[in-house]
Image: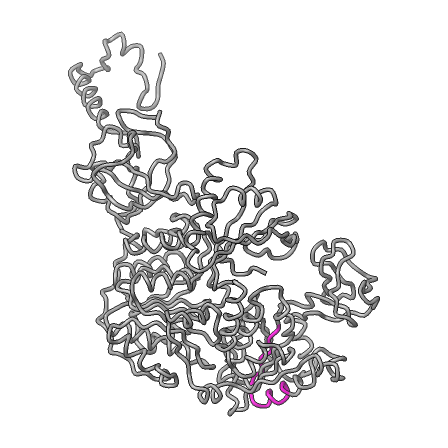
């Protein structure tokens, strides 16, 4: 006798001989059971196919944006809405659909097959433009509407500007779902607070008027050149408070978690708990999603966060604030790589809200906003600037040549004196362009970079070792000589933070030495005498301010082969010098750089706005960004050539290049967008005049989508396209 298992198991041979009756079971009962099973199996479909299920009576078609970031699929797809999902399938919710089934896979008038994929339900319509049968929505993941009409419009604008896909932008805009966070109710919204007093905004011309305009429901737009010191976070809190007082929301985007903590503390001190949300990646997925939901539900009207917060769904947005727009952290590394400044500019135009771009320094893009009349300058008088800024002194090449101490050691006499005098009053900051020990070496006579004989890579000094080693291939070099002048003596081209801390520790043995860099970033340091060695951007805040600051190896930052080298060096110097006490309190800054250079002179005068205005004028004459719009196409030579031959560029477009890119070393960190290690790539720049950026982005997106749709047919090689690249050499 055979035995079967499972729902389709066969009965025994004895049952078959008995006419299908089980032992002791009446035949009528078995017949009723079998009939009930047959009736139950008719309307029930396999999971997520809804075969035979009735459709929604009203608006039975759902337009879905599938989570596919490829450009040739950057559109909506129509799906049928089963009646059982009618109530939950509302615009803005997350759904799952089957994607990739062909026209031939149709059963009972419904498409089936394909793989399950996530997506967003964009809208419900009565009819579809698609001629074939529709697949049904597989599942409504959550009834929480996370994609509003405003957020969808912003994401589409960002995708069009950067020649990217809408799905990629929404991956940046909408955080991953947490079911536990969705189940928790958000708190009830608090009533608007009272408008704050101007406070330290009174130091700026028109500062009080800016706050009054926000509190009265206006939408002022300003570029704010902040005075040195730590009051900037409190000043941001006051403009947020003024916006909340008008019954509207505010969004603040800052470069890193340390800046978020300062603005968070200032907002709490001014407005109390529960009026703002903090959106950072460090918070963890569940907490970040819970805070994001509180913002979307309208429980919280103010947001402060890092780059990802630029898409925060703040209701009734009245003000967007961006602090330090020149910081690299504001540029998103994931496709389509938008910059927070441009996203907030789009939000200000879309929501017709106020806009505040603030920094101790001033970028060329900020200067362009003022020159075009789109924003007004928000600056302090020269008397206020001189009263708040430290004394800045310079040490150039001529001073170093006459300085015996500078030839024997790395720091000139003026720097040693500034350190010695500053340590009598408090901590001293030392800014070093590189982290580590001795990253790069050069000839002591002619300063030509020391290169490896095998691969021409840079030679590095090793901690605790006398031999040199190549930073690319790792080969050791024991008998180096300069091919330019024949010299045999080496000097540190750029000395790292740890080596600098070691030298200063030997010179000042009784003083503690602290380092702050990528591996370990300090937030604050006490006001007691100490040496704080930091890389740019990692400078901790000292209690009461630093007594002095040394800005070393200025030529290393100014000598970078990049259009923004001078602007970026000045921004980093001012960010460090802004932490030093005012000149009236004895604050001194010594910068080791040629004093005749424009960025150095701007630092001495504390005039970053004037420097940015002159840079903008020169770029306008040469047709460089931001006056023009530019895109970069990079990849293997054959891929770049094929792309440039296929793309239909606007008539005003100008192609520069292509030119070879430096080969990426196998060792060390790889920059975003850099070629894979060992591969030889080329890059072409495409430039268009003002007003033609949208046409350029559309042409690039169409060409890239066509190549992706062909799937590499015909031996095509993939290339990378980036609109508004941050560095163009």
Q: Give coordinates of residue 64: x percent, y percent.
A: 31, 42
User: For the point 82% across and 64% down, which residue is it?
Assistant: 481
- Can residue 496 be seen in the rendering of this structure? yes
Q: Give coordinates of residue 253: x percent, y percent.
A: 40, 66
Picture quadrant where residue 106 is located: top left
Pick whichever, 445 or 146, lies toward us: 445
User: For the point 37% across and 37% down, which residue is it?
Assistant: 116
Picture quadrant where residue 150 is located: bottom left
Colour mode of the rendering:
one colour
Quarter holding the C terminus is bottom right
Q: Which residues are magenta?
A: 418-432
- Can residue 261 be seen in the rendering of this structure? no
Pick whichever, 187 or 349, lies toward us: 349
Quarter holding the N terminus is top left
Q: Farthest residue toward the front?
A: 651
Q: Give coordinates of residue 144: x percent, y percent.
A: 27, 51
Q: Give coordinates of residue 419: x percent, y percent.
A: 63, 85
In this rendering, the answer to whether 46 lies above or below 33 is: below
User: For the point 30% across and 15% down, which residue is it?
Assistant: 11
In this rendering, the answer to whether 655 lies above or below 359 is: above
Residue 109, magenta (yes or no): no
Pick whichever, 321 or 312, lies toward us: 321
User: For the point 21% across and 19% down, which residue is it?
Assistant: 34
């Amino acid at each position: 006798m055979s035995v079967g298992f499972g729902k389709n198991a066969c009965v025994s041979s004895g049952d078959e001989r008995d006419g299908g009756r089980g032992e002791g079971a009446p035949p009528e009962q078995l017949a009723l059971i079998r009939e009930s099973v047959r009736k139950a199996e008719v309307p029930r479909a396999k999971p997520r196919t809804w075969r035979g299920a009735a459709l929604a009576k009203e608006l039975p078609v759902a337009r879905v944006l599938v989570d596919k970031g490829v450009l040739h699929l950057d559109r909506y797809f129509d799906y049928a809405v089963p009646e059982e999902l009618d109530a939950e399938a509302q615009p803005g919710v997350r759904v799952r659909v089957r994607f990739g089934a062909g026209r031939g896979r149709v059963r009972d008038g419904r498409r089936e097959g394909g793989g399950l994929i996530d997506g967003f339900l964009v809208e419900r319509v009565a009819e579809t433009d698609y001629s074939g049968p529709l697949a049904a929505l597989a599942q409504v993941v959550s009834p929480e509407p996370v994609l509003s009409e405003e957020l969808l419009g912003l994401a589409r604008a960002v995708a069009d500007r950067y020649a990217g896909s809408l799905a990629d932008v929404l991956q940046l805009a909408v955080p991953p779902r947490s079911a536990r966070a969705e189940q928790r109710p958000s708190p009830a919204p608090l009533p608007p607070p009272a408008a704050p007093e101007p406070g330290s905004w009174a130091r700026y011309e028109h500062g009080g008027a800016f706050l009054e305009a926000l509190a009265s429901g206006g939408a002022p737009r300003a570029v704010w050149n902040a005075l040195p010191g730590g009051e900037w976070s409190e000043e941001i809190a006051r403009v947020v408070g003024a916006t909340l007082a008008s019954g509207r929301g505010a969004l603040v985007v800052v470069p890193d978690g340390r800046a978020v903590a300062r603005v968070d503390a200032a907002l709490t001190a001014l407005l109390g708990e529960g009026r703002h949300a903090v959106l950072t990646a460090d918070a963890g997925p569940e907490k970040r999603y819970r805070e994001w939901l509180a913002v979307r539900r309208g429980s919280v009207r103010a947001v402060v966060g890092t780059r990802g917060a630029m898409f925060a769904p703040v209701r009734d947005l009245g003000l967007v604030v961006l602090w330090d727009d020149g910081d690299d952290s504001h540029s998103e590394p994931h496709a389509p790589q938008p910059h927070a400044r441009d996203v907030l500019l789009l939000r200000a135009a879309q929501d017709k809200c106020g806009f505040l771009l603030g920094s101790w320094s001033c970028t060329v893009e900020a200067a362009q906003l003022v020159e075009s009349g789109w924003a007004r300058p928000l600056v302090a008088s020269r008397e206020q600037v001189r009263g708040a800024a430290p004394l800045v002194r310079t040490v150039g090449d001529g001073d170093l040549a006459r300085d015996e101490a500078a030839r024997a050691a790395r720091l000139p006499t003026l720097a040693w004196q500034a350190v010695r005098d500053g340590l009598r009053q408090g901590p001293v900051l030392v800014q070093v362009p590189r982290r580590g020990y001795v990253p790069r070496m050069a000839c002591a006579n002619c300063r030509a970079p020391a290169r490896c004989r095998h691969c021409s890579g840079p030679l590095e000094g090793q901690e605790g070792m006398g031999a040199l080693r190549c930073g690319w291939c790792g080969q050791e070099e024991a008998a180096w000589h300069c091919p330019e002048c024949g010299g045999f003596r080496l000097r540190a081209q750029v000395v790292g933070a740890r080596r600098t801390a070691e030298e200063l520790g030997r010179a000042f043995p009784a003083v503690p030495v602290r380092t702050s860099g990528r591996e370990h970033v300090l937030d604050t340091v006490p006001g007691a005498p100490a040496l704080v060695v930091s890389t740019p951007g990692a400078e901790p805040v000292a209690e009461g301010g630093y007594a002095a600051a040394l800005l070393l190896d200025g030529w290393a930052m100014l000598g970078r082969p990049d259009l923004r080298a001078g602007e970026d060096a000045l921004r980093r110097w001012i960010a460090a010098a802004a932490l030093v006490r005012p000149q009236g309190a004895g604050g001194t800054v010594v910068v080791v750089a040629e004093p005749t250079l424009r960025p150095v002179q701007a630092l001495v005068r504390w005039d970053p706005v004037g420097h940015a205005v002159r840079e903008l004028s020169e770029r306008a004459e040469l047709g460089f960004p931001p006056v023009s719009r530019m895109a970069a196409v990079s990849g293997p030579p054959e891929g770049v050539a094929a792309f440039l031959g296929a793309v239909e560029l606007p008539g005003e477009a100008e192609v520069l290049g292509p030119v070879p890119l430096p080969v990426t070393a196998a060792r060390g960190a790889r920059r975003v967008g850099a070629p894979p290690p060992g591969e030889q790539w080329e890059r072409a720049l495409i430039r268009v005049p003002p007003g033609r950026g949208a046409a350029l982005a559309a042409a690039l997106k169409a060409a890239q989508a066509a190549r992706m749709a062909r799937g590499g047919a015909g031996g095509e090689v993939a290339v990378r396209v980036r609109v508004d690249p941050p560095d163009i050499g």
